[in-house]
Amino acid sequence: MCFSIYKNCEFGSEQACRKKIAIIGAGPGGLAVAMQLTEQGHDVHIYEKAAEIGGRTSLLKQDGFSFDLGPTALNMPNVLTALFADCNRNIQDYIKLISLDPLYSLYIDDIVFSPSPHQDKTKRAIAQLFPGEEEHYDRFMRDNAKKMIYLLPIWQEPFTSLWSVFRLRTLRALPSLTLGNHLIDELAKYFEDKRLRLAFSFETKFLGMSPWQTPGAFSVIPFSEHYFGVFHIIGGINRLTYAMSEIIQENGGNIHLNQCVQQINIASKNITSLTLENGETVEADYFFLNADYAYAMSHLFFLPKSTY
Ligand SMILES: Cc1cc2nc3c(=O)[nH]c(=O)nc-3n(C[C@H](O)[C@H](O)[C@H](O)COP(=O)(O)OP(=O)(O)OC[C@H]3O[C@@H](n4cnc5c(N)ncnc54)[C@H](O)[C@@H]3O)c2cc1C
């Protein structure tokens, strides 16, 4: 997740002059911002406290083996393809993506359900294991495709003030948020067999939640897996963050490892500089905070509330 702090910036416009940008954190969010800003010709510096890039999507090497420390499979690669295309790169020149079929195998009680990115195959599997539910699967996919069309744009927009909530696009998406309904209730509208409801809600454990607590809007997650597929990157998801850093460096950007930002300095409600743990002060025209938001707000800003 990336949080930007703007002054009077016209990034991307023809007139935009070269600005110095400081980014805190070399997780996928910080790297994505740096890719785009270096592509636009800005002088970009990422300050990363760890010895490696990647954040929670980084790599552990041990005894000749490599392990992904965070995510292991990729969903909706179209988002990444668009990011690379924005930087005039073809993602396939950097990473090798394999579409998994089956998506995964789920062992629930006495059955093994292995859905496919091909919906006709999934329907056949459902018809075999849960006769009669295959039509319900069709309806689930149809309804969630519509839900996705309304929800995706608002998930990709910043909410910078209370008024953002009242944008037409947001108001139109309200019914799709199925407020007050939990995911398990949403799924009960479609699937009669409780095992099938679990098969379409296990992803909530990745969010540290249960389907009985997760908002109903999250039905778009199983939908997106079934619709777009689940992908493996040869070498692991960490290859993606390395590919991103490669592009940043090709574009002349700088990634400073082992450089912990200790403080974000503010004057007249604007961020003016960063103080690194080694005492160095970093000034820049724009600052991007990619560190965990709650941690950053409580540890990196040291100002009385009245001055915010
Ligand atoms: C086990 C596991 C499984 C996961 N599975 C999935 C999944 O299937 N799908 C999915 O979408 N997501 C998954 N995630 C989450 C995913 O890894 C994160 O959403 C993603 O890495 C967030 O990227 P980010 O750039 O916003 O933040 P981060 O990856 O957290 O990067 C933030 C970076 O900022 C650096 N930093 C923090 N403070 C400072 C400071 N003061 N100075 C300098 N640097 C600083 C950190 O060291 C870090 O490198 C998983 C995570 C884990 C741990």
Image: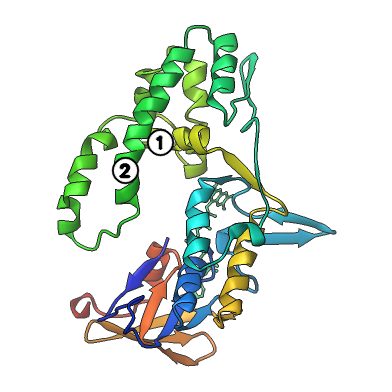
Binning the other alpha carbons within 10 Å of mark 1 as few (below 14), some (14 to 19) or many (20 upward) gives: many
Q: Residue at x 46, y 71 (%)?
A: 36
Would residue 94 be visible to someone looking at this image? Answer: no
Secondary element under disc 2, as helix, strand or loop, is: helix
Residue 130, quarter of picture: top right
Cβ of mark 1 under 8 Å from ligand 1: the answer is: no
User: Relative to the observer, which residue lies in front, 28 or 134?
Assistant: 134
Picture coordinates of residue 50, whole percent (x, y): 60, 72
Residue at figure coordinates x 40%, y 88% from the top left: 18
Label total for image: 2
Q: Quick check: 270 left or right of 222?
A: left
Q: In the picture, residue 120 is in which quadrant?
A: top right
When the figure is inspected, residue 80 is found, relative to residue 230, above or below; the finding is below
Q: Earlier in the sequence, mark 2 or mark 1?
A: 2
Q: Residues within 10 Å of mark 2 (few under 14, many from 20)?
A: many
For the point 19% across and 57% down, the residue is: 164
Q: Name the residue under label 1.
A: 220
Query: Up-down: is 61 above or below 76?
Result: below
Side (left or right) of 30 relative to 9: right
Residue 305 visible from this viewpoint: yes
Which amino acid type corresponds to the residue marked 2 in the rendered image? Leu
**Quadrant of residue 253 in the image?**
bottom right
- C-alpha separation, residue under disc 2 versus residue under disc 1: 9 Å
Residue, disc 2: 151
Q: Where is residue 83 in the image (x, y as percent from the top left)?
A: 48, 61
Residue 158 in the image: x percent, y percent?
A: 29, 60
Question: Depth check: 137 or 289 in front?
Answer: 137
Q: Say what amino acid the circle numbered 1 marks.
A: Val
Q: In which quarter of the image is the C terminus?
A: bottom left
- Contact (Cβ within 8 Å) of mark 2 with mark 1: yes
Please tell me whether residue 42 is drawn above or below residue 162 in the rendered image: below
